[in-house]
Image: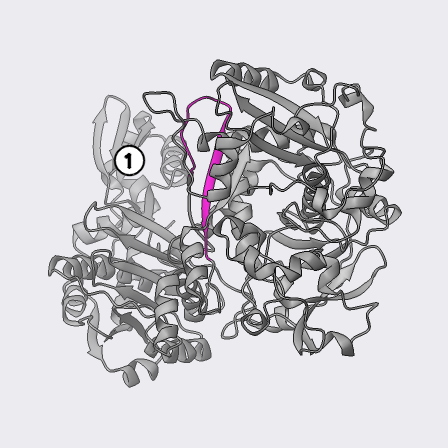
């Protein structure tokens, strides 16, 4: 440093042989007599040699240089004294920006302000000019054709204004940044600063905003439009004026160093009612058709190759390659009601009991279908997360929301268009193998579907084998070859289902993970869990109890004590099926004439993880039935008819199969073979082999998106059952007999008339 200067934003005070530097939230102490003597000479006008000469004999050379290095190392010095007023110099010093660079950038660059819709350019032009910047209002054509020594600031009342697409194309072509803002409404938006090659572009932003405007999308479709516009109407002079001043301040910083801008790839919303600000990260989408490569999705290979993936976290939430906190920190920037794949994250119920951790996350669930019922469900829909810790519940909710987001059909997924009759049946999977509805269910579907209690158990039309449909390419882990799966089954909201109602989309087998292997293991466990539950539930099988004491876990003791304190019993059944993967059902009843029976399920190759999952899931449902009126009657937190009927009428006397089979010994942790090794790929291969021996093929569809930091898959196992009512011949009837649970298979008429209610 040639001409050292103490940064101008510091107030200084000396006490004895100490220098105190006072900034706004930045207070420092520089000790030593040499630091005190040196302070008056740090004005940026003297060279180091001149300072040492003027100090003369006051301070030794070594002491003076040491003090100077101490000031510099702490970041308290800047180079030289630019020709700026003291207060302006102090501002730039506080921002960590070289004032000389800021001054030169302001002289060299002109700001072009484009106003669209109801936005006005004048307040911002005035604010920029008052800040010492060159600025003028321009037309749309002028903004598109802007030269190299300019920065375009686009003001609009709606970020989906199509004029912004022209600007985006122009700036991507010339590689220069531009700034976006919405000064109107009760919540002005500032940014993002869009930097080609560094941040997402306007198309990335528009895709997320559009997806989060579910009502506007529905209404736009009714009007025959494609863009879900929502221009703001509310306005007071203070809003645009405040936005203009904030933008002017940030524009000066952008000119000095765009990399340091708080708006680089970030939008800030300001709530004028509460004065709260919120940051929203613009995620750059590698597959973006404007700034990325859409072939990353449109030409993605379906092949799944398992890679070594060591599980380093095995205490909660399954086998994971990293602890939940790290996953949360990596994914939290995807939460935003405007730019997020996840619209919100919050606690489901704050019970304060120390065992029930349950969070919900809203998901960006843009659907291509023009369907009012879907709109209503999507607006109310949310993903749930559970865990024995708060952070695990948060991560679980976030990951489930990303699963839902990733599984939505957007028209960019590679497909084969064909009728089933024209495809190789060894490659294309028939819907009957996936859904498992019986002939009787198809025959009576009109009457069945008309009952509002059956919303989870709708029976579709028989599969139209002669109709041309989209087929999605997936990969058989069992045979290491490609499979074709009907796209209406593989994705949410596929348009084929508008014409051919051959299935209802569901999340069975959908899972996410830090790695593909982690996600596949989770998805497989879900398929196994629901299949085992279906075998037990619809056959009303007497199953052995699982001994919770064998877990030797303080969490279990705490949970049982809590349930006892609220007059509830708790036990766990072992539902493990012929696949040998541990599956458990946690069951709790209230000691009351209305028993409010709740159930939770869990499956995992590690029996302890499976049991804890079942317990945390029953915890997740407990808030639905834990409130009482003054007479002790339950105040239910659900309006689902089937759930209410179950809670109000089901008892262990009427449903004795919910109780442990006392004729069978309780299973313990020691009854299950311990897992060998921590490689998730190895565990997946073991699961695939277990399924193969049971005559079940395991197929994986990779639904991961390049713009998200999470692997997402749908695991498909033809012949395995959902726990919703699917009564075709097969495992539902055969496995209980093979396992010795039944002497002979039930008939369809003998199966449990009550459905799984969630």
Q: Which residue is drawn at 11% across and 61% down?
A: 237
Q: Nearer the viewer, residue 287 or 48?
A: 287
Splitting the image into 4 quarters, where does residue 115 fall?
Answer: bottom left
Q: Residue at x 77, y 51 (%)?
A: 307
Q: Would residue 56 be found to the left or right of residue 696 on screen?
A: left
Q: What stretch is highlighted in magenta?
A: 347-364
Provide the secondary structure element on which disc 1 rests: helix
Q: Would residue 336 be found to the left or right of residue 739 on screen?
A: left
Q: Residue at x 39, y 26 (%)?
A: 627
| Residue 5 against residue 351 in the figure, above or below | below
The residue pinned by badge 1 equals 38
Report x, y in % for residue 662.
75, 18
Q: Would residue 46 be found to the left or right of residue 626 on screen?
A: left
Q: Which of 127 and 241 is in front in this view?
A: 241
Splitting the image into 4 quarters, where does residue 467 fall?
Answer: bottom right
Q: Which residue is drawn at 63% across and 38% down?
A: 322
């Amino acid at each position: 440093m040639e001409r050292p200067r103490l940064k101008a934003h510091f107030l200084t005070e000396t006490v004895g042989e100490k220098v105190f530097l006072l900034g706004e939230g930045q207070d420092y102490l520089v000790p030593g007599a040499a630091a005190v003597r040196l302070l008056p000479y740090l004005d940026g006008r003297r060279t180091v040699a001149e300072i040492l000469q003027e100090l003369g004999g006051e301070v030794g050379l070594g002491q003076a240089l040491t003090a100077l290095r101490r000031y510099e190392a702490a970041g308290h010095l800047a180079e030289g004294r630019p020709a700026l007023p003291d207060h302006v110099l102090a501002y730039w010093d506080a921002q960590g920006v070289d004032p000389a660079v800021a001054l030169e950038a302001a002289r060299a660059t002109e700001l072009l302000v484009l106003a669209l819709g109801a936005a006005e350019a004048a307040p911002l032009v005035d604010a920029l000019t008052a800040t010492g910047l060159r600025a003028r209002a321009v037309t749309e054509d002028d903004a598109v054709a802007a030269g190299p020594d300019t920065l375009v600031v686009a003001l609009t009342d709606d970020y989906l204004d199509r004029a912004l697409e022209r600007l985006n194309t122009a700036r991507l072509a010339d590689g220069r940044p531009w700034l976006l803002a919405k000064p109107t409404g009760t919540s002005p938006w500032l940014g993002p600063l869009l930097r080609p090659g560094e941040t997402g572009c306007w198309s990335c932003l528009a895709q997320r905003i559009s997806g989060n405007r579910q009502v506007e999308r529905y209404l736009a479709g009714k009007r025959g439009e494609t863009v879900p516009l929502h221009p703001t109407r509310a306005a007071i002079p203070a809003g645009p004026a405040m936005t203009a001043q904030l933008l002017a301040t940030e524009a000066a910083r952008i000119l000095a160093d765009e990399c340091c801008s708080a708006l680089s790839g970030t939008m800030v919303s300001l709530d004028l009612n509460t004065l709260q600000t919120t940051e929203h990260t613009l995620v750059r989408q590698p597959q973006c058709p404007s700034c990325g490569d859409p072939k990353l999705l449109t030409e993605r290979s379906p092949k799944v190759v398992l890679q070594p993936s060591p599980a380093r976290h095995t205490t909660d939430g399954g086998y994971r390659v990293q602890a939940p906190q790290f996953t949360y920190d990596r994914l939290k920037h995807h939460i935003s009601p405007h730019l997020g794949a996840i619209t919100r994250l919050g606690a489901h119920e704050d019970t304060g009991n120390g065992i029930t951790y349950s969070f919900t996350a809203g998901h960006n669930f843009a659907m291509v279908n023009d369907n009012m019922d879907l709109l209503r469900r999507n607006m109310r829909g949310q993903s749930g997360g559970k865990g024995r810790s708060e952070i695990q519940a948060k991560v679980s909710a976030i990951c489930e929301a990303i699963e839902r987001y990733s599984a939505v059909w957007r028209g960019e997924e590679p497909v084969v268009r064909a009728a089933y009759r024209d495809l190789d049946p060894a490659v294309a999977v028939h819907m009957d193998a996936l859904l498992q509805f019986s002939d009787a269910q198809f025959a009576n579907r009109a009457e069945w579907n008309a009952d509002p209690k059956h919303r989870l158990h709708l029976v579709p039309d028989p599969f139209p084998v002669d109709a041309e449909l989209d087929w999605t390419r997936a990969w058989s882990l069992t045979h290491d070859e490609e499979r074709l799966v009907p796209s209406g089954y593989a994705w949410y909201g596929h348009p084929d289902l508008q014409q051919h109602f051959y299935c209802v989309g569901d999340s069975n087998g959908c899972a996410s993970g830090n790695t593909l292997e982690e996600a596949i293991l989770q998805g497989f466990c879900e398929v196994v869990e629901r299949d085992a539950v279906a075998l037990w539930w619809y056959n009303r099988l007497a199953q052995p109890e699982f001994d919770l004491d064998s877990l030797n876990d303080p969490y279990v003791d705490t949970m049982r004590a809590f349930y006892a304190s609220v007059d509830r019993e708790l036990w766990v059944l072992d539902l493990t099926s012929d696949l040998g993967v541990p599956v458990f059902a946690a069951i709790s009843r209230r000691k009351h004439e209305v028993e409010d029976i709740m159930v939770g399920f869990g499956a995992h190759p590690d029996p302890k993880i499976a049991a804890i999952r079942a317990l945390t899931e029953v915890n997740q449902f407990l808030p639905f039935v834990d409130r009482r009126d003054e007479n002790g009657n339950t105040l239910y937190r659900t309006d689902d008819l089937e759930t209410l009927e179950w809670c109000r009428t089901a008892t262990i006397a009427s449903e004795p199969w919910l109780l442990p089979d006392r004729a069978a010994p309780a299973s313990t942790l020691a009854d299950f073979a311990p897992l060998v090794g921590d490689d998730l790929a190895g565990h997946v291969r073991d699961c695939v082999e277990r399924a193969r021996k049971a005559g079940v093929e395991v197929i994986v569809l990779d639904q991961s998106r390049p713009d998200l930091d999470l692997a997402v898959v749908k695991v498909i196992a033809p012949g395995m059952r959902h726990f919703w009512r699917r009564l075709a011949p097969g495992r539902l009837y055969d496995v209980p007999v093979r396992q010795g649970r039944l002497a002979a298979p039930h008939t369809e008429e003998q199966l449990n008339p009550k459905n799984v209610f969630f």
